[in-house]
Image: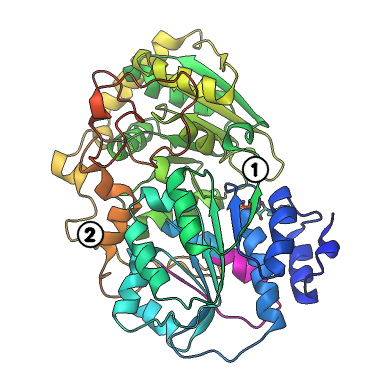
C-alpha cells in the first residue's frame, strides 16, 4: 500500500510528501481506512510506530472535507495525551500534516501560565491537544466549551490511567456530544483499558501492531555488570569511548537523575535532567537543548521513556534498570527510530539482577555481556577525585532536592510556552495556576517523595515466571498492585 491508495485530500498528501514519507506504516495502513470511514478505532500501538499520523491524517481529512466556521471557545477535534511533551509533539504533528489546510491547532498543558492558553482558545480552534488536568481547569474557567467536539482521540491511554487521569477522563467525556467519532490508542490492553474502550467507543475497529517486546529489534543491546557506586565512572568513560553522538541516560528516580547530571558536570560533560519535579520551563529548555544538539546527554526518569520522538538518539544508557520490564522496551525505543541504528547499554548492579532477568524474559533473549574497561580501577579513582574536588557535584540540601519546583507547584520559572508550530520557549509573565497539579499528574504525586521510582505503572501481563521478589508492595503508592513492581534490596 502507499499513501495514494488512502485517497487523502491533496493538501494533506502534499504535506506528507514534504515530510518524506513514502509508505504508510503498518498502524497507519490498518487504522487510516476505518478512521476515514468514520468508524471508532481502538489502536494497540506505541509511539515510534507512526501512530500519531494514524489518527491525525484521517482527522485532518475529515476536517478538510467538511470545513466549518470556528465557534467561540470551541474545538472540533480534541486529543488528550498524558504528558506535556507528548501533547506538544502531537500538536506539532497536526500542524505539520495540516500545513496546507487553513486550520487552527492549539495545545494546552499545565505548568505554564494559563492566560495565553485562554486567549488561544477564545476564537475557537479546529484541533485542541491537551493534557486532561489543564483542560478541565480551562473548562471550569469558562475558557473552553467541549460541546462541539466531533472527533476525540485518547492517546497513550494506559499511561493516562497510570498517571491517575481516569476521573478527569470521565468528566471530560461527560462534556462531549454523544454523537462523535472516538479513537483510543494504547501500548497495552489491560482490562482497565478494555473497560474504557467499551465505555467510550462504539463498535470500534480494533487495530494492532507488534507488541512492545518485539519493536526494538534494530537496537544493539548489551549489559555491563558494575557496582552502583562505580556506575558514574563507567558512564563517563562510555560517553567518550562509545563515540556517543546523542544519548538519553535513564535513572529510576528524579533525585538519581539530578545526581548524574551534577556528577557528569565534574567530568566536564554537559547534561540536563528531565523529570516530574522540574518546572515546565526547565523541561522545555532541556529538551530544546537536546534536540538542537547543544547538549548531547539528557538524563531522564521514565516520564521521558514514552512519547518523545527525537530521531537522532544514538545511545540509550539504562543507568539504573527499570523495575518494570516493559519500561525497558519503552526506554530503548527512544533510539533506532526512523530507520536508524541504535545502541542500548544497561549498567546492572548486583541488586538489579532480578530486574535484568525480568527484562531478558520479556524480550526473549539474553543481553550480550560487555566487559568492564581494562583500566576501570583507574577510572573509578579519577571519578572519585573529580567529584570530590567539584563543588557542583556535591549533594544539595535535602529539601531542595525534593522540591525544586516549589511547593505551590508553580515552578520557579513560569516562562515557557510550547507552541503547536514548534516555536520554542517564550517569556511570559505570571504564574501557572495549576502547575503543581499537572506536575503531580506528570509523575510527582504518585511517588509521594524522595527516592522513589518515577514512571508508568506496568500494564499487561507479567512475563511468565517473573514473580516479584521485592518487599511486599515494593514501597510504592498505595493503589498499585503490589505484585507488579520490585524494589531492589537496600534501596
Ligand atoms: P509516532 O509513532 O507517531 O511518534 O512517529 C514516529 C516517527 O515516525 C515520527 O518521527 C514520524 O515523523 C515518523 N513517521 C510516521 N509515519 C511515517 C511514515 N509513513 N514514513 C516514515 N516516517 C514516518
Decide whether residue 323 is among the magenta residues.
no
10 Å crowding of disc 2: few (<14), some (14-19), many (20+) = many
Q: Secondary structure at mark 2?
A: loop
Task: Give the residues in magenta.
Answer: 91-108
Q: Is residue 452 above or below residue 399?
A: above
The residue under label 2 is: 409
10 Å crowding of disc 1: few (<14), some (14-19), many (20+) = many
Q: List x then y, in percent, for residue 373.
A: 51, 12
Q: List x then y, in percent, for residue 191.
A: 45, 45
Left or right: 456, with 384 as reference point = right
Residue at figure coordinates x 51%, y 29% from the top left: 239
Image quadrant in which you'd find residue 119: bottom left
Image quadrant in which you'd find residue 391: top left
Asked whether the beta carbons under mark 2 and mark 1 sit within 8 Å of each other, the answer is: no
Mark 1 within 8 Å of ligand 1, using the beta carbon: yes
Q: Secondary structure at mark 1?
A: loop
Left or right: 288, with 172 as reference point = right
Residue at figure coordinates x 71%, y 77% from the top left: 100
Amino acid at each position: 500500500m502507499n499513501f495514494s491508495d488512502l485517497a487523502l485530500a491533496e493538501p494533506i498528501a502534499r504535506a506528507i510528501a514534504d515530510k518524506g514519507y513514502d509508505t504508510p506504516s503498518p498502524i497507519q495502513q490498518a487504522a487510516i481506512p476505518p478512521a476515514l470511514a468514520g468508524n471508532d478505532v481502538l489502536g494497540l500501538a506505541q509511539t515510534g510506530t507512526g501512530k500519531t499520523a494514524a489518527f491525525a491524517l484521517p482527522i485532518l481529512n475529515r476536517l478538510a472535507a467538511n470545513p466549518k466556521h470556528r465557534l467561540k471557545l470551541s474545538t472540533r477535534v480534541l486529543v488528550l495525551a498524558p504528558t506535556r511533551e507528548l501533547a506538544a509533539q502531537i500538536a506539532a504533528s497536526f500542524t505539520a500534516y495540516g500545513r496546507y489546510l487553513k486550520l487552527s491547532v492549539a495545545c494546552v498543558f499545565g505548568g505554564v501560565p494559563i492566560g495565553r492558553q485562554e486567549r488561544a482558545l477564545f476564537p475557537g480552534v479546529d484541533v485542541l491537544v491537551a493534557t486532561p488536568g489543564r483542560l478541565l481547569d480551562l473548562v471550569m474557567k469558562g475558557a473552553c466549551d467541549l460541546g462541539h467536539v466531533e472527533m476525540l482521540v485518547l492517546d497513550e491511554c494506559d499511561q493516562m490511567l497510570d498517571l491517575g487521569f481516569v476521573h478527569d477522563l470521565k468528566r471530560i467525556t461527560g462534556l462531549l456530544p454523544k454523537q462523535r467519532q472516538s479513537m483510543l490508542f494504547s501500548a497495552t490492553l489491560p482490562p482497565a483499558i478494555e473497560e474504557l474502550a467499551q465505555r467510550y467507543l462504539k463498535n470500534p475497529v480494533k487495530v494492532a501492531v507488534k507488541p512492545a517486546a518485539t519493536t526494538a529489534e534494530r537496537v544493539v543491546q548489551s549489559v555491563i555488570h558494575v557496582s552502583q557506586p562505580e556506575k558514574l565512572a563507567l558512564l563517563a568513560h562510555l560517553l567518550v569511548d562509545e563515540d556517543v553522538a546523542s544519548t538519553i541516560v535513564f535513572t529510576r528516580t528524579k533525585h538519581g537523575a539530578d545526581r548524574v547530571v551534577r556528577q557528569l558536570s565534574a567530568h566536564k560533560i554537559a547534561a540536563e535532567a528531565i523529570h516530574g519535579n522540574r518546572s515546565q520551563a526547565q523541561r522545555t529548555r532541556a529538551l530544546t537543548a537536546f534536540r538542537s544538539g547543544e547538549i548531547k546527554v539528557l538524563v531522564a526518569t521514565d516520564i521521558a521513556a514514552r512519547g518523545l520522538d527525537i530521531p537522532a538518539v544514538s545511545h540509550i544508557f539504562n543507568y539504573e534498570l527499570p523495575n518494570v520490564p516493559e519500561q525497558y522496551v519503552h526506554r530503548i525505543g527512544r533510539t533506532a527510530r526512523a530507520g536508524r541504528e541504535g545502541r542500548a547499554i544497561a549498567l546492572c548492579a548486583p541488586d538489579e539482577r532480578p530486574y535484568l532477568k525480568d527484562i531478558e524474559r520479556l524480550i526473549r533473549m539474553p543481553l550480550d555481556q560487555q566487559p568492564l574497561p581494562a583500566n576501570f580501577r583507574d577510572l573509578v579513582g579519577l571519578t572519585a577525585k573529580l567529584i570530590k574536588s567539584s563543588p557542583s557535584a556535591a549533594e544539595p540540601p535535602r529539601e531542595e532536592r525534593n522540591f525544586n519546583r516549589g511547593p505551590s507547584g508553580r515552578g520557579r520559572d513560569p516562562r515557557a510556552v510550547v507552541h503547536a508550530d514548534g516555536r520554542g520557549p517564550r517569556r511570559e509573565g505570571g504564574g501557572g495556576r495549576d502547575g503543581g497539579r499537572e506536575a503531580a499528574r506528570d509523575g510527582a504525586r504518585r511517588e509521594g517523595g524522595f527516592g522513589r521510582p518515577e514512571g508508568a505503572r506496568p500494564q499487561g501481563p507479567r512475563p511468565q515466571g517473573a514473580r516479584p521478589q521485592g518487599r511486599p508492595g515494593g514501597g510504592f503508592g498505595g493503589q498499585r498492585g503490589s505484585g507488579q513492581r520490585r524494589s531492589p534490596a537496600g534501596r
